[in-house]
Every structure is written in C-alpha cells, then in structure tokens.
Amino acid sequence: MTEPPPAPRDAAAPNAPPHAPPLRPSLLDPLFAEARRLPGVGPKLAPLIERLLGTPERPARVLDLLFHLPQGGVSRALQGSIAEAPVGEPVTLGVTVAAHRPPQPGAGRRPHRVLVEDETGDVTLVFFGMPRARVEKMLPLGAHRYVSGRIDLWDGQRQMVHPSRITDAEGLADLPAVEPVYGATEGLTSRAIGKLALAALDRLPVLPEWQDAAWMRKNGFPSFAEALKAEHRPEEASPRRPAGDDPLSPPPPASPARRRLAYDELLASQLALALTRARQRRKPGRRNAGDGALSGRIEAALPFALTGAQARSLKEIRADMEGDRRMLRLLQGDVGSGKTAVALLAMASAVEAGRQAALMAPTEILARQHFERLSSISEALRLRLFTGRDRAAERRANLADLADGHIDVAVGTHALFQESVAFRDLGLAVVDEQHRFGVHQRLALGAKGEAVDMLVMTATPIPRTLALTFFGDMDVSVLDEKPAGRRPIRTLAVPTERIGEVVVGLGRAMERGERVYWICPLVDESEFTDLAAAAERFEDLKAHYGDAVGLVHGRLAGPEKDAAMESFATGRTRILVSTTVVEVGVDVPEATIMVIEHAERFGLAQLHQLRGRVGRGSRDSSCILLYRGPLGAVAKARIEMMRETEDGFRIAEEDLRLRGEGEVLGTRQSGSAAFRLARLESDGDLLEAARDDARLVVERDPGLRSERGEALRALLYLFERDAAIRLLRAG
C-alpha cells in the first residue's frame, strides 16, 4: 500500500515578510520521513531503529539511515587465521565452536559469550540480548562455522561483538563478494541495517548540484547520490573510484565518494557559520566599556598578577566591547590558565558602562562555584545566583532585582535564558564550556538585551580544525600561559594489579593533610563492561578509611551532589570517589592526588581535564593512571602522551589524530557540531577549502538567491543547519 505524501514544506511561513525564503523544500520530504515507514519495518524492528538512530527530540528518519555509513566492508574471502587477524578491522574467519558461556540467571543483562577457535588461537563471540536457544542453534558445539566481523581487544582478550555474519560452508558460497559492516545495536544486526539502507536509497530524490563544477572535476567527486550509493553498495561502487582502490576496506579518506560526502557536510557547517557571522557583523554594537575604575580596583585586589596571556586577551576583549560591532569571541585556555579572572574583568567593564552581565555555566555545581569564586574576589559587583532549584519566592525577588537593575552580574545555569528572565540592560553574556550548550541556547541568552556582546569560554584546548568547526563564527583569544606558582603534576601509569599499593599510599597522603580524587568510568555495572563501578569502589575504600570517603556521580540529585562536593571542598571527606562529573571547573586546591581507574578507557582530552583538577595549590601533585593490560596501541599512545606532557594543546592535537573530534571535545550532544560523515582527523584540508568556499558564497550571494545559492539552501536543510536559513528569513 502506498503511503500518502508528506505535507508540503515549500510554502513561506504565514507571517513571513513578502520575500521571505521558503521553508524546507518539499523535494527533501522523502528524506525526512520516519524510517519506521520503510518497507519491511515491523513493530519489532521499529524500536530498535529508534534506539540506534533516533533521539529523544525526534524519531529516526530515512536521512539518518543514509548518513549511517558502513564502518567498512567484509569480503567473502577468508582472511588468514585468528592469530593473524588484524585488530579493529573486519575479517572473515573459519572457526570451530569450542564452548558456550551463557549469562548466569539473575546476572542482569549480561551477554552470551561463545568461544570459537582454530589451530592458531581463539576469539570470543559476544551477543547481547539474544535468546540462548538462537545462539546455540547458530553455533552448535563442535560445529565448523564462518564468522565475519571486527575483532577488538577487551582486557587483552580477542572478541567479536555481534558478528555481522555466521554461516556454514554452503552459506558462504552463496554470500555476496562484499558485505558492508554497519555500526549496530542490541537486537539489530549489521545485515538488517544494510537492507534498510538500501530501502532508504530508493527514496533518494534527484537533488540539485550544490558543489562548484570546477571543484568537482578537480577532485573527481561523484554526485551526492552516486557517493551514497558507492558507500552503501560497495559491489556497485561508482566507476569514479580510482583503479586499485579496495572497496573491501573501510572507506579511506582518499575515497572520492567518502570525500564528497565529507565535503558536503563540512560546507554546510561552514556556510551556516559564515551566514551567522555575517549577520552578527551587520548588527550594530553599543560601546560597552567604562573608564576602567571598577575593573582596575578589582584587578588590584586579585591575589595574583595577570599573566601576559590574560592581559593580552583582556585587551582584545575590551577593544571589541568598545567598538561599534557586537563582540562574538571565544576565550580558549588550558586547565588552570585563568579564564574566570579575565571574564570577571570583562564583566566589570560592562558594569562600568552602566550595563549588566551574565555568566552561564553548564551545570549547577559549576554555576555555584563560579558564583562563590567571583563573590570572594569582588565585593564591588552586585552578584546573584540563578539556578533551576531556586525557591519560588527567592526566584521572584531575583527576577525583579534583575529587571530593575539592582543586580550587576547574574550567574547561573540554563535557567538564565528562560523566558521569564529579563534584564534591565544586558551588555555582556559569558558562556562557560560553550560546547555543552547548543548554538540556539547561546543565541537565546544574547537575545536578552540590545546589542549584547558575547564571550564564550572553553577549558578544552582545541586544535585549529576543531576551532574552525565549532567556533568558526568567532574571534579567538588564547590563554597559553599558566599563572605563576602552578607546579607540574607528576603522572604515573600503574597496572591494576598494584591497586592495593595505591590504596595504602592514600593513607600516607591523608596523614599529610592531602585530598584525593578517585575517578571511575561507570556508576554501576553495564552489559558492555566489567569495569569497577563507582559505588563498589566507594564501599571498598570506605572499608579502609571510613567516613573520610565520599561519593558523587551523575545519578545523584542536585542537592546530594552539591553536599558531597562541599564535604570534599571543606575537608570533611578526604577521598572523593566520582564519575567524570568533576571533569570541568571543580576547584579544590587541597586536592593533590588524582587516581583514574581504567585509564585506558578514557579519551586523552578527558584524561587531561581530569588531571587538571589537581596541582591547583602550593603542594606537589600526582596523577595515577590505573590501567588494565595488555594495552592496545591507541590506549598505550594516550597514556604515554599523558606521561610526556601537560601541554593541553599538544594533547588535543594528538587526541584528534588518535580518536577523532568527538573525543577531543568530550561530547556529541545535540547542538554541537559533531559530524556524521566527515572525519576531521583526516579531512582537515577539506575543512579549510569549505571555509574559503563558504566565505566566497556569502560575499557574492549573501541571500543565497542564485541558482547555486538555492541548491545550497537544500544542502543546509539536508545537514540540519536550519538556523542559518532562519537568519536569512529574518534578514
């Protein structure tokens, strides 16, 4: 039965100005239809697709399937023995089933494990959520089978999670020469995703070409449709693939099809940023700095002298605030480089000019800490804290004072950009840890006043390619010096077999009055890992040190979390067992030891951020990386880099090379610029080209009215950079 077409989306909004650009072109509607409407998707499959590709805000769509590219391809040809099989790459192996290890009753959602072997070694096949009878039917004890999938090392043992293919000799002969391997989820196999992807390809409409023809020829790029087909149907790969290019391996950065799709996504991102920046530049600013008396008084009262980098950044910020254009600036600084002091002095400049300032932090813990830190170093500013937990009467009073101008600086969480919050005259908005907020949230805060200057801060050192990607619409100031007196942190790598020695050593440190962070990667046991849980480690350490041990994790309610942090900050507890909620911003100068359990499971950027929680006082500090060996190549490289340097910018560049952009920023939240098709670690040259192309487009066709401009509108919608289209409509 043919489903009715979606409602048209190409009419202008009812209240739009006469020449407003249209909403999403109806041509794209088949791609934004729900994936659950594809042929063959029944009630069992639909929720699995949602789990894999949907979000809490929207269902999985046909577009999401098309952009869920294969991680690689498996050849029907056998590829050596288990011992020779490369880790991290798809392989097909001939094996004998040696043992079944089903989960024990009552063990929660543990996997069913199957040990298979050949004459050179063994590998464990791992199945989550699959009935025991089905696993045993596919893999009878003693049977010879052919399995395809990716081998990974887990705690030093070879394993293959949810093989993409399990067959006997007869079935192997009937298989296609190449089968794409997709990232899957529990209950939804790679092969099932492949069939859905092919159904999604059938819905792909004929789209206008938005790329420059000369650029296409120069790079040998196929069309957008040809590129998607080459990725999802490796046996029907476009003839534009260079001779000798192996379609069986994961699509390499040099593959014209993958490069074409990466460039499309990068161009959409850079064009959206260029349009945002052009609009920002068109908006008039207001002089937003006074005579320097108030900020001079605050600077003189600081317990430290500004570093050269702080002074330089402050000069850049004040020059923006004194200009006739609105400021949009990123203040980027490594852990402990003194961003808060710079932000305080910038906010004082706005207050000198008779205006107000706001500082928005991503969590209540950080908002309270900013408030307390600012209050302790500046009595000259009228500060007030706004959070989602304010009592009704307190909130009403605060809102009234803010609207009347009796508050100079509002410090808070996302509560600051709610509709009920009104400033008398907001002049400067400071956003801490920008990548944890969506761009729309940043814009919502900036809309709280007239010609609001915007300063966003991040403690995550960002390589140039990521700075262009996430903050390409901003000017950048960099704090590349640490304040005087900061001591180096000694970093040690210790195998988990020596955990007992570490626990005993903590007692000696506490006798000297020191405090300890102990970081665990999980709150409780997961079906994916046997890592020690934070709660379990808390009980273990409590058996040694009693009430000196505290616990904080993301599942605690706000007041409980605040109480646990306060107990540690005041010294009532001396060891704080925690998940990564202490990663950013938490400041306890007495903390001198950071223990990171299962350090091999963390990204470099996260390890660096965590290490930065110590070394903030006058005592020597240490970071102990507890790891379980043997280490894979990437984990080993991360730990070696941590031992080698404390330079966050160097660490960030290495992290980008090892793990890609999602790990460097430590987030793939909604609103962040994480990519689905582009790989910044290998597509940096395309990013530079996309930025130049976007700038030229905006200079020559700022309204995207030309033939190519109209096609580029489709590109922006396709990659969901809709905010840029809304800016065009708003003029």
Image (tube, rainbow, N blue to C red):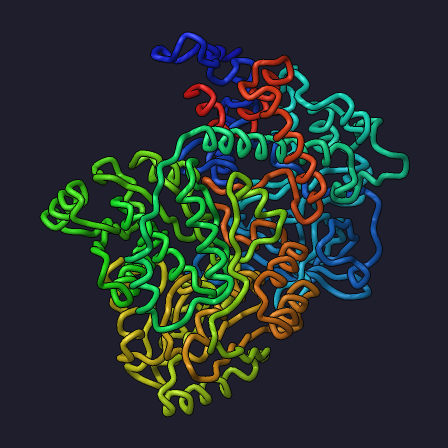
Q: Position of residue 61 (x, y in %)?
A: 51, 28
Q: Quadrant of residue 287?
A: top left
Q: In the rendered view, does 185 fall on the left or right side of 426?
A: right
Q: In the rendered view, does 327 fall on the left or right side of 642?
A: left
Check the image and name the residue furthest to the front: 291
Q: Nearer the viewer, residue 491 or 307?
A: 307
Residue at 40% x, 89% y is 507
Q: Quadrant of residue 695?
A: top right
Q: Nearer the viewer, residue 58 or 647?
A: 647
Observer able to see residue 398: yes
Q: Is residue 422 above or below residue 477?
A: above
Residue at 69% x, 42% y is 181
Check the image and name the residue furthest to the top: 18
Q: Is residue 63 above or below residue 546?
A: above
Which quarter of the rendering shows the C terminus?
top left
Q: Position of residue 120 (x, y in %)?
A: 81, 65
Looking at the rendered structure, the number of numbered marks drawn on it comes to 0
Q: Position of residue 571 (x, y in %)?
A: 29, 80
Residue at 63% x, 62% y is 650
Q: Nearer the viewer, residue 237 or 374?
A: 374
Check the image and name the residue furthest to the right: 243
Q: In the rendered view, does 200 fall on the left or right side of 427?
A: right
Residue at 72% x, 27% y is 229
Observer able to see residue 110: no
